[in-house]
Image (cartoon, grey):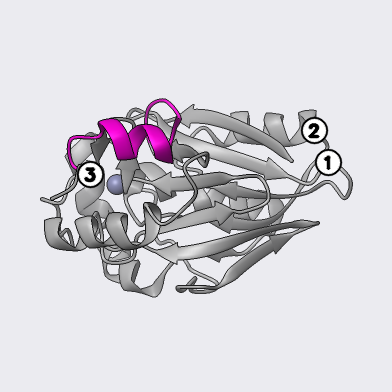
Amino acid sequence: MIHEILPVGPLQCNCSVIGDEKTHEALVIDPGDNIEQIQALLEKHKLRVQQIVITHAHIDHIGGAMKLRAATGAPILLNQNDYALLQMLDVQATWIGMENPGKVEIDQSLNQADTVRTGGLTAQVLHTPGHTEGSICLYFAPQKTLIAGDTLFAGSIGRTDLPGGSFEKILQSLHHQVLALPDDTRVVPGHGPATTIAAERENNPFLRKR
Ligand SMILES: [Zn+2]
């Protein structure tokens, strides 16, 4: 599996470009900004984008999605519980001083236990509400890799004080879904360095036994 991680935009959202090295089909997760750089990565590996997956509808994760869709023709996938947040991208833009990306159209909802396939790669969708109602994680079981969005960070968890956030729900999502994954799972959070389930189980102050 080809996996490039590119921090994009003013909040340095980790955009993942994930491709099958045999078929050269790919998915792009969270193209928040810097679409030219994402396209350069796709060209470097000769990848064709099949899906654009959004872990949640915060502007730093979704801001460049329409531009990437226009360039590649790939559909945009987002859990339907975050559609309400799409109606306030203009407000979100003012929060962080980003340009309003305009209307974002979703082609398909991604729900709990759905699978996303590209080439020979399969990711399982975990619906993990808490940071937002529609937050999802993508789990590539054979590659032992979790794309965690803003649900889990190295040493921390996603903030729950924004519209749609819930501290109770994020803890439930983390304990019942994320920590159910094997210890040696590599976790790529929405911001900051990668970690593992074992490291977070052990050291994350939010995840120690309640
Ligand atoms: Zn977020």
Residue 125 appearing in the image? yes
Considering the image in quadrants, where does the N terminus appear? Answer: top right
| Residue 203 covered by magenta stretch | yes
Q: Position of residue 136 (x, y in %)?
A: 41, 60
- The residue to which callout 1 is attached is 21
Left or right: where does residue 79 sit relative to residue 122?
left
Label 2 SS: loop
Image-based side of 73 in relation to 96, left or right: right
Q: Secondary structure at mark 3?
A: loop
Q: Which residue is mark 2?
A: 45
Q: Residue at x 32, y 51 (%)?
A: 58
The location of residue 174, given as percent across then percent down, is: 30, 54
Contact flag, marks 1 and 2 (Cβ < 8 Å): yes
Residue on which disc 3 sits? 207
Looking at marks 3 and 2 on the same chain, the residue that comes earlier in the sequence is marked by 2
Between the C-alphas of marks 1 and 3, the distance is 36 Å
**Mark positioned earlier in the residue sequence (1 or 3):** 1
| Segment colored magenta | 191-206
Q: Nearer the viewer, residue 135 or 140?
A: 140
Kindly identify the amino acid type of the residue bearing the numbered disc 2.
Answer: His
- Residue type at the position of mark 1: Glu
Identified by mark 3, the residue type is Leu
Seen in the image, is 202 located left or right of residue 3?
Answer: left
Q: Is residue 30 visible?
A: no
Comes first in the chain, label 1 or label 2: 1
Q: Residue at x 34, y 47 (%)?
A: 59
